[in-house]
Amino acid sequence: MDRLKVTIGDLELKNPVTTASGTFGYGSEYADFIDLNRLGGIFVKGTTLEPREGNDYPRMAETASGMLNAVGLQNKGVDYFVTHIYPTIKHYDTHIIVNVSGSTVEDYVACAEKLIALEKIPAIELNISCPNVKEGGMAFGTSAVSAARVTKAVRKVYPKTLIVKLSPNVTDISEIAKAVEAEGADAVSLVNTFLGMAIDAESRKPLLSTITGGLSGPCIKPIALRMVWQVYHAVNIPVIGMGGISNWKDAIEFILAGATAVQIGTYNFIDPTVSVKVIEGIENYLDRHNLRSISEIIGKLET
Amino acid sequence: MDRLKVTIGDLELKNPVTTASGTFGYGSEYADFIDLNRLGGIFVKGTTLEPREGNDYPRMAETASGMLNAVGLQNKGVDYFVTHIYPTIKHYDTHIIVNVSGSTVEDYVACAEKLIALEKIPAIELNISCPNVKEGGMAFGTSAVSAARVTKAVRKVYPKTLIVKLSPNVTDISEIAKAVEAEGADAVSLVNTFLGMAIDAESRKPLLSTITGGLSGPCIKPIALRMVWQVYHAVNIPVIGMGGISNWKDAIEFILAGATAVQIGTYNFIDPTVSVKVIEGIENYLDRHNLRSISEIIGKLET
Amino acid sequence: MYLCRNHRCFLCILEHVFITTHIFAFEMKKMLDFIIRSNERLNSRNHLLKVSPSTGEKLPPMFPGQFVQIWVDDSPATFLRRPVSINFIDEKKNEMWLLVQIIGEGTKKICARKEGSLLNMIFPLGKSFSIPPDTKTKTLLIGGGVGTAPLLFLGKVLKEKEFSPEFLLGGHSGKDLLQLDNFEKYGTVYCTTEDGTKGEKGLVTHHSVLQKKKYDFIYTCGPQPMMMAVARYAHENGIHCEVSLENLMACGFGACLCCTEKTTKGNVCTCTEGPVFNIKELTWID
Amino acid sequence: MYLCRNHRCFLCILEHVFITTHIFAFEMKKMLDFIIRSNERLNSRNHLLKVSPSTGEKLPPMFPGQFVQIWVDDSPATFLRRPVSINFIDEKKNEMWLLVQIIGEGTKKICARKEGSLLNMIFPLGKSFSIPPDTKTKTLLIGGGVGTAPLLFLGKVLKEKEFSPEFLLGGHSGKDLLQLDNFEKYGTVYCTTEDGTKGEKGLVTHHSVLQKKKYDFIYTCGPQPMMMAVARYAHENGIHCEVSLENLMACGFGACLCCTEKTTKGNVCTCTEGPVFNIKELTWID
Ligand SMILES: Cc1cc2nc3c(=O)[nH]c(=O)nc-3n(C[C@H](O)[C@H](O)[C@H](O)COP(=O)(O)OP(=O)(O)OC[C@H]3O[C@@H](n4cnc5c(N)ncnc54)[C@H](O)[C@@H]3O)c2cc1C
Ligand SMILES: Cc1cc2nc3c(=O)[nH]c(=O)nc-3n(C[C@H](O)[C@H](O)[C@H](O)COP(=O)(O)OP(=O)(O)OC[C@H]3O[C@@H](n4cnc5c(N)ncnc54)[C@H](O)[C@@H]3O)c2cc1C
Ligand SMILES: Cc1cc2nc3c(=O)[nH]c(=O)nc-3n(C[C@H](O)[C@H](O)[C@H](O)COP(=O)(O)O)c2cc1C
Ligand SMILES: Cc1cc2nc3c(=O)[nH]c(=O)nc-3n(C[C@H](O)[C@H](O)[C@H](O)COP(=O)(O)O)c2cc1C
Ligand code: FES
Ligand code: FES
């Protein structure tokens, strides 16, 4: 099984298949469907310093091969996570990575600090790319300067593996990736959702309470794949790729484009067993292609 | 029929339904399927100063609810257009708008100048957003400065309606729209294709000869719609909306978001009669909603 | 005092019925292919599908108000699964019934499926209606349109548990009232139609039985305005009332947080905390 | 000198056959629903579909080498239409035959369609094989795998025009050789199989008939390496050779410029200038 092992910063994942923040709850939602311990890692729900009620209903609209969401980081806050949720999930034999969000740099820092002591949380993912909150969120991820600023501040206090999650809603994602790399990020993950919108022609109203929301699912895969490929060639830290992965082929494509690991998001809603199928598909691919290790093909797109 | 009439600069379209450049040839490709004279307008193929052979095969990859193309502006050049193609299409009872592309500002200007004299070409669309050419193209459309520069130069020589076609591969499309408005563009059209990529997992090779290509089709609609809505609120010139339109509902959504007219692109490949169906669907919508004119709902999203 | 809403809760089974907050012992959720045993067109917009696990395995315990998530894998226009209530469980035949109304592409495709074809479903999802502890409790099940779907199953269970449920079913016209024969097996059925073609003319909340009789428990499912009117009636008359919501869902099992409803406890997921809610938990009535 | 490739060209019809560049009088392209009259599984990967216009209208004139674009409207994985050659036209029954090999989602869905269901198609598309002016011209039709599809129709037309076409069909194994009975109606059939289970063992280009006989015209369709080998053989032996390409297509009617092939005239669209090309137009052989 070692041939699936990959390394992100100080973090060793037993395989490159993880699940994306906000689409996999705290893992337990999927425990009926799969053995969570088979996953390379679980990126849990977006967590903020203070509890958040999230946005008003409706928060979801189906689109062609995808969906828009406007959840808006509903969560009970980092303290609740530490005291109530962490104890119930810390026994998983997989890495749990907390996705951290905030409205100010101080929020990110304070939230990150509270997670340091949690033994079974080896890494955090800074979400500087949430399109569904009014302040902060995506605003940090759409400029190299502010992305660098929040990375720098968190890096100062957070000694474990620091992953920064990039927004695709930018002209040049490599530039942002380089900026967070320069400030000490151990890895970048991409992409978060694309800012999108849906309208009901009959009522002439937006379908989301927030008018715009985040687009995810297979529809975004071609753009996400391109961005992973660009970022892979721009930075020296590992890239975690995601955006529309729905089967092992997609995962291999991201890995060929340069992803050391992948996250599966929206497709878990359609097939809650998809993550395990992807792991099995990758194993099978290695067999068929006589590869000793997945690392042999990371970034090995033949151009 | 007047209730479908819309105005773009000096241009009066009999209805807001037009076809997108590069997806509708010179119109004649569709003459067997529909009465071209019913269209509000036809945006013909991307035209350049010099003939271009385009990119190598393969130029196309199917994606979830969309496709990537890497045609690369294959065309016989503006002179050939003027002497050979124009005479065969000038009798259409619809507006023909030429999509102009170039590698340098001078190219755009020279190409535009050659089109001024053509009586039945009342407008050009400056394509500053083609992701499939090495120099120029999208590079012009991803910075407000260069977008303004090319608009200004063409505006100086081109007296008829000047439409600038924006790239969606940017952080802030409103900023670009405002920049070209300031330089005298009569309208903006958006969006061009998104830069994307597709890989064949088995061969480990890109599916396009150019590695990356332009993503179009229903998959991009939610993002395109959001951009049209943003640009509508940022500028005072008309907005021509497109991106994934496949039926009348989509067209109404773009119009509610702020589009004065729409372009239908990729979906013509699937259903070559879609444009006429959209016109009929819009008429029917006006009837059902007791609207006297389409202009009553342009930008009238109820938020 | 009544049994907790998860009929499988071992604490309730041990009759610790006075414990109101306790760990529920849920049946595992599954993803499984079902085979369509029959697909009957009830009227122009509604189909009744009877399905059973293609593996032949026995259906797990399921409870009225719970739902399934159906994968519509033969349509380019449906990306997400479609939630549909469990209409009935036929234990003997090991069949689940689904009553589906054609609304858009997804339900159209589901209804077009032929006998013998497969339907991939995630189930059982959500919390069920609660069963009163005392079988003398007077229960009324009010349904509108396809909202009657979960009430048939609920009527059956109530009857089996020796309640005497009554039904009040509304529709636009007589032909919209579905499965009346089935409902009649479990209790008296009152009807209203807007055009007066069957039962009393008007809306369910105007039916005379609501003036004449006094109920202790009302369960309702149907269009939102109808449920709100029922909730108001129940509230005004101090009747325990449970409604089944149809919020838009992406996952159906608590992972996406898209299906939230504002409650007295804040935003909660309809798919895991509902779809059945006591109206007291909702913010419908101030 | 031979007839222009568009058999409907009025100039050719007027027998101005020496005019080589002139306006072709094309049959109109149409988008139409066809009804599947039958769907026969020929082997594990190939189906033969016989379809006719659901409107009952008469099929327009169509020519061998032309193709249709099929809308796969029941799959989330197929956005674009799928190009398929016209395998045969049965004028009497007003039926078109399509020989489809299961490759991916699109062809799988097409082959899964039941008798009586509809298939939306755009047709007829592309240019056909050319017919030599002299019926004494010795023609050989070389097909590999499902590439034999357009050759059956071509064989029929040649035979009707009083040629004596011969066929050389190759496959991996005997069961991959499709429609042999049909081919035999129109001329001698030679076979090769890689495993030797039928005809000569080996590849089509190694068949002994190519040594023994001399042909004037070779038409070929099949896997690219096979066609290239055939083209090389024809070129070396000075034989007129036409190949039918299967470039990836988005539209199929000249609008997208995605299906280009490099030719002596530069990049041209396979869907409008092909799919049939004279090998002299291609850049395959230097
Ligand atoms: C818990 C639950 C149980 C349900 N039980 C049943 C059942 O037993 N039988 C049944 O026929 N239906 C039931 N529904 C509703 C059913 O899920 C929807 O009708 C279906 O998802 C519509 O899908 P579609 O593709 O046909 O229509 P779409 O094309 O998705 O939608 C068509 C139109 O209907 C609107 N719409 C779709 N779904 C809903 C919804 N849930 N609420 C409000 N508007 C909506 C859309 O916004 C759109 O305007 C239930 C829903 C939920 C949440
Ligand atoms: C003019 C023309 C005529 C054709 N005639 C026939 C015919 O008569 N019968 C028949 O069975 N097929 C024919 N084909 C091929 C057929 O169109 C493809 O097999 C089909 O489009 C594959 O679709 P799919 O969804 O099943 O596979 P996909 O899922 O689209 O593809 C599966 C794999 O096959 C590859 N692939 C798909 N299409 C092609 C292609 N055209 N060339 C090379 N690789 C491809 C893809 O890249 C992918 O790797 C013809 C193609 C053309 C262009
Ligand atoms: C319902 C939903 C909620 C999400 N919440 C978060 C979140 O809290 N934090 C975050 O960084 N990303 C969040 N995302 C983004 C995903 O983690 C992922 O980046 C994105 O969906 C693209 O991957 P996919 O196409 O596989 O879903 C959310 C996505 C969805 C669909
Ligand atoms: C095959 C193809 C070729 C295109 N060529 C051009 C072009 O020459 N000039 C241009 O401005 N846009 C071109 N486009 C972009 C379209 O005009 C349109 O902006 C885009 O496809 C989005 O709309 P759609 O989703 O409706 O296709 C092309 C698109 C496709 C698919
Ligand atoms: S539908 Fe996903 S949480 Fe309820
Ligand atoms: S397939 Fe579109 S031009 Fe040939």
Image: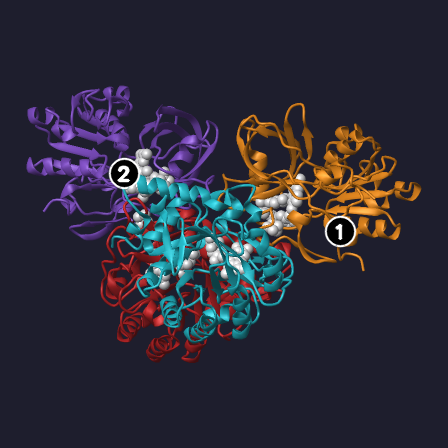
Chain colours: A red, B cyan, C purple, D orange
Identify the amino acid type marked 1: Pro
* Mark 2 residue CB less than 8 A from any atom of ligand 1: no
Task: Choose between D271 and C141: the one closer to the eye.
Answer: D271
Q: In which quarter of the image is residue B289?
A: top left
Location of ligand 1 given as a quarter of the image: top left
Identify the amino acid type marked 2: Arg
Of all residues shown, which one is farthest toward the right?
D212
Number of marks present in the image shown? 2
Q: Name the residue under label 1.
A: D225
Task: Choose between D92 and C223: the one closer to the eye.
Answer: D92
For the residue carrying disc 1, how many other residues have a C-alpha within 10 Å: few (<14), some (14-19), or many (20+)?
few
Give the x, y percent position of residue D264. Answer: 74, 58
In this rendering, which labeled residue sits more in front, label 2 or label 1? 1
Chain letter for mark 1: D
Give the x, y percent position of residue A275. Answer: 46, 53
Task: Choose between A195 and C281: the one closer to the eye.
Answer: A195
Q: Mark 2 points at which residue?
A: C8
Q: In which quarter of the image is the C terminus of chain B?
A: bottom left
**Taking B164 as reference, is D2 left or right?**
right
Question: Alpha carbon of mark 2 to alpha carbon of mark 1: how far?
Answer: 64 Å
Give the vertical position of C90 relative to B268 (above or below).
above
Label 2: state its secondary structure.
loop
Give the x, y percent position of residue B40. Answer: 43, 50
Chain letter for mark 2: C
For the residue carrying disc 2, how many other residues have a C-alpha within 10 Å: few (<14), some (14-19), or many (20+)?
some
Q: In which quarter of the image is the N terminus of chain B?
A: top left
Label 1: state its secondary structure.
helix
